Image (cartoon, rainbow, N blue to C red):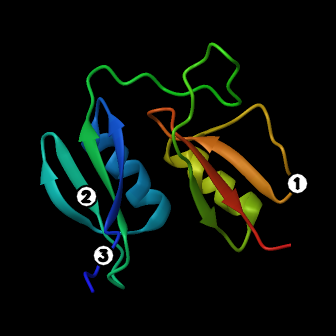
Amino acid sequence: MTRLKLTSTVLGTPDPRGLADFYQKLLGWPIGTDEPDWVTLRPEDGGAGLSFQTETEHTPPVWPAGRADQQMQLHLDIEVDDLAAAVELATAAGAKVADFQPQDDVRVCLDPAGHPFCLWTRG
């Protein structure tokens, strides 16, 4: 049987290194590959990481999206122990808290390139 292994989720951005720096501050993962158009972060436990590629025509999605808006293609879910502290860390690193928040134990944030991600805690 052929083995398949997810190694990374790739986010498009006009600034791969800048977005990698943001997620490095948020997750604490080391930078792996560091090229002008391609930067990777990998957790030290060898799990799937994040990669960032140049997309000069990147259009950030709208959250929540309306019918004619740029749709979100994916979002990241990041489990945290302390929701308020995690939101503070994320905003200090450059995230924005989304205006619309659908759940009390989740905070939807937007990274510097506009990709939504959720900070959440087990209730």
Q: Is residue 82 above or below residue 40?
A: below
Which residue is disc 3 drawn over?
4
Crowd around label 3: few <14 · some 14–19 · many ≥20 (10 Å)? few
Q: Is residue 78 above or below residue 100?
A: below
Q: Are marks 2 and 1 in contact (CB under 8 Å)?
A: no
Which residue is disc 1 drawn over?
104
Work out which quarter of the rendered image holds the C terminus and state it: bottom right
Q: Is residue 41 left or right of residue 94?
A: left
Which amino acid type is marked by label 1?
Asp
Which residue is disc 2 drawn over?
40
> Which residue is rendered at x = 26% and y = 23% of the image?
56
Q: Residues under labels 3 and 2: Cα distance? A: 20 Å
Which amino acid type is marked by label 3?
Leu
Q: Is residue 7 left or right of residue 65?
A: left
x and y percent of residue 62 in the render?
61, 25
x and y percent of residue 98 in the render?
70, 35
Q: Residue furthest front?
A: 1
Which amino acid type is marked by label 2?
Thr
Q: Nearer the viewer, residue 39 or 89?
A: 39
Q: Residues under labels 2 and 1: Cα distance? A: 32 Å
